[in-house]
Image (spheres, rainbow, N blue to C red):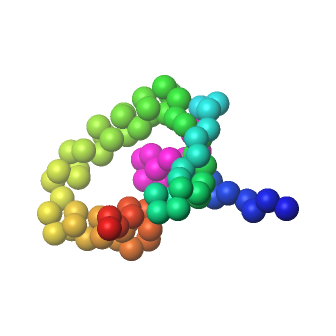
């Protein structure tokens, strides 16, 4: 029996979102070359949604204290949403 492969979603507007595209792509472990996950590739509609949400959020993010922004990014890293680089 084959092991199930983890599904990676998109993160748009502060929420995990499944892509609406029809194509999928394997995500490889750079250390072993093994497939570690799959992601549904985003469609043009996904890109449009992400761009509009990012533009809407940019003003508030830019106005946020840099120390608070750093804490948010470190929280992403701690949750595994923003992987550390070797």
The residue segment tinted magenta is 10-20
Q: What residue sits 50% from the left and 47% below the top?
A: 10
Q: What residue sits 58% from the left and 46% below the top?
A: 26
Tell me where residue 42 appears, x and y as whole percent. Answer: 52, 35
Tell me where residue 35 appears, x and y as whole percent. Answer: 60, 54
- Most foreground residue, 59 or 12: 12
Tell me where residue 23 appears, x and y as whole percent. Answer: 62, 32
Considering every residue shown, the one lying at the far front of the view is 32
Considering every residue shown, the one lying at the far bottom of the view is 78
- State whether residue 9 appears in this view: no
Q: What residue sits 33% from the left and 41% below the top?
A: 54
Q: What residue sits 41% from the left and 38% below the top?
A: 50
Up-down: is 7 above or below 73?
above
- State whether residue 81 appears in this view: yes
Is 84 covered by the magenta stretch? Answer: no
Task: Say which quadrant the C terminus sits in.
Answer: bottom left
In the image: residue 10, left or right of residue 86: right
- Most foreground residue, 42 or 86: 86
Considering every residue shown, the one lying at the far top of the view is 44
In the image: residue 69, left or right of residue 8: left
Total count of labels:
0
Task: Say which quadrant the N terminus sits in.
Answer: bottom right
Tell me where residue 72 appears, x and y as whole percent. Answer: 30, 66
Up-down: is 56 above or below 4?
above
- Most foreground residue, 22 or 85: 85
Considering every residue shown, the one lying at the far right of the view is 1
């Amino acid at each position: 029996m084959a092991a199930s492969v983890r599904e990676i979603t998109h993160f748009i507007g502060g929420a995990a979102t499944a892509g609406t595209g029809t194509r999928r792509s394997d995500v490889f472990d750079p250390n072993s070359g093994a497939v570690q996950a799959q992601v549904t590739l985003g469609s043009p509609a996904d890109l449009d949604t992400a761009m509009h949400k990012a533009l809407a959020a940019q003003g508030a993010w830019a106005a946020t204290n840099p120390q608070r922004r750093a804490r948010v990014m470190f929280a992403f890293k701690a949750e595994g949403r923003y992987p550390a680089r070797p």
